[in-house]
Image: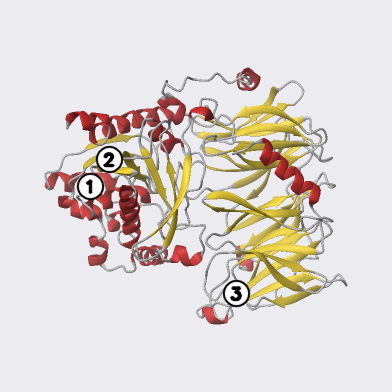
Amino acid sequence: MRNKFLFLTAFLLFTLTSQAELVPIENFAAKSDFISMKISPDGKLMAFTYEQDSSINLGVMDMKTKEGVYSFDMGPNREVASFYWGNNERLIIQSQRITGWLDGAQKHPELFSANYDGKKRQMLWDFQRSFIRPVSLLEDDKDHVLISKHHYSDNYSAKLQRLNIYNGKLHFVPDSPKLKGGLESRISYIAVDSDENPRFAFEYDPVEPENFDDDITYLHIKNKKDDWQILELDVKHNEQPDIDGLGFNKDNTKFYFTSNHDLDHNGHTGLFVFDYKDNSITKLFRHEDVNIGGALTGRDNQIIGVTYEAGYPGYYYVDEKENRDDIKLHKQLRATFKGQEIDISSYTKNKKMATLRTYSDKNPGTHYLYDVKNLKIEFLSNSKTGIDPNLMAAVEPFTLKARDGLKMYGQMTLPPGKELKNLPLVIFPHGGPYGAIDRWGFYPRAQLLASRGYLVIQLNYRGSGGYGEDFQEAGYGEWGTTMQDDLTDVTLWAVNKGYADKERLCIHGVSYGGYAALNAVVREPDLYKCSIPDAGLYEIELQWDKADSFKGRPKAKENYIKQSFGSTDKAVLDARSPALHADKIKAALLLVHGTEDVRVPIENAYFLEEQLKKAGKSYEKIYRKDGHGFQKVPYRIELYNKMLAFLDKHIGEKSQSED
């Protein structure tokens, strides 16, 4: 442990590699040295997460000596999910089961607390038939935090509780808002103001659960008389609105939230403000294409703006006069770290010191200690110490229209030092598929491929998240059809733009991306020269008979298959199972899978192999004892070496020399 902290100071001066020298594969495969950092309220200690072996761990550092104090053990097959400082001596930590990269298996979270030296460890909450959400850390109460409890017996409706972080005891907050609706109604969210008083809540009431047209969303508002007042939100469309609370302004007269309630369709969210002076709701901002992202908060934890991402990250500030100093500070930091995005993850109680993280398309993350009072910045660590941002590839966003006119966003990772012309191309679709999204930022695998001269394209095809419910729902029922056409369209777009060489096209993805990578060379056998499906599902019925996703839940399985394919009819599922059409494949294949994958069991790959052999098709493969997407670094290194050799042979320089 001590060596890791000594390393913090040892790499303050980063050794640059010459542009002519390739960054080693090992550097792209390595885990993150440091993920997140939060300073204690008194500024004397720093808690941080880091990756080691196959888990995310939590350590504590003395800020004066920069040496390690303690490293927490989460228990067998468990890792850190999130953490907070409850007071100067006590940490609140949520752990979860390690399930592997991209694995959607149950995490079985647990919440516990402990002193920074590991002593007086106490289980606070075991998430089984209920869950809790943090509401406030209660800065002036060293023994408690405020949470909302969502119990199954209450239909998961929220109730405020004070949680003792030393013994785990709960104390009900009698000032919690009370339900207005019927038996199926539930309060989903409760917010407190800067004085820790509950003042705002959302309630959703499906009056008749089978009839979406009569659903009601209520706002619970604490009025001037300190009484709860209930208002019905005017929802313009027939589905439950996508709504989320952000927080209050500095003097608690306004509450900000994101929603799409005002649209006549289930579109993307905008920023709204509720004004306590007249109970009015005003829309402040909505981008034409994308959802509101996260909130920007000031030093008093008030809302000063929001983020959104339409290609590059963007910001919208609120009440620039009231929040002048905090907005000025945010803009100054953006100017200081030009080309970087910034995230302030914690403040000391007196707001004089903060932890700051910067990141970009080329930078996986750099952590700083920020002296807010004296405007001084002290370097702490890089997230990935083997990555020099100066040697990384730029990521350039783009938009295009699918063949049916749907507007889509994507990003290109551009090979450094190469002209954007007639490049070998790798299409890299994300997993999920529903709700997942590729954002502007650092992707190790895309950067690796770009470093070896390949243009990499990531498309947020229909069904992806971040562009509103309508965009996501456009992918429902479209596995293997229109969603696949989107990937074909972006491939042809890159060729027609002159960016990609039409004779050197490959597709690679993980999970759903693995399905799409195989289905692409079935559906478009003459388009791609090669495909690298990783942890993909290839025979639909086999997949959900074997996977852990719906064990003991046949109705949930049926509903998901209907959502994905539009039908449970065998003929439909067989038509969209790429392994059953292996005879159509002309492209070279490299199959990748973990033998311990429970989300997409390796039986998918075994079945595909059988079908390829029957069709007389050749292929390469790499199977290793790992989960859903290789977690073990040695396996990643081996995979990356094999991928690069495979790509070089089929679309790289070697393929050209053989021609």
Crowding at dot 1, Cα within 10 Å, few <14 / some 14-19 / many 20+, comes out as: many
Q: Residues within 10 Å of mark 2 (few under 14, many from 20)?
A: many
In x, y percent, where is residue 150? 64, 61
Circle 1 is placed at which residue position? Answer: 608
Q: Secondary structure at mark 2?
A: strand
Residue 130 spot, x, y in % from top left: 61, 58
Q: Which mark is residue 184?
A: 3
Q: Are marks 3 and 2 in contact (CB under 8 Å)?
A: no
Q: Nearer the viewer, mark 3 or mark 1?
A: 1
Q: Nearer the viewer, residue 306 or 577?
A: 306
The local secondary structure at tag 3 comes to loop
How far across and down, in percent of the image, does residue 40 sit?
A: 76, 36
Up the image or down, 317 lies above or below 641; here it is below
Rendered image quadrant of residue 161: bottom right
Which labelled disc corresponds to residue 591?
Answer: 2
| Mark 1 and mark 2 residues within 8 Å of each other at the beta carbon | yes
Label 3 vs label 2: CA separation? Answer: 47 Å
User: Of 266 and 409, which appears nearest the observer?
Assistant: 409
- The amino acid type of the residue labelled 2 equals Leu
Query: Residue at the location (52% across, 70% down)?
Result: 266
| Mark 3: amino acid | Glu
Residue 134 visible at all: no
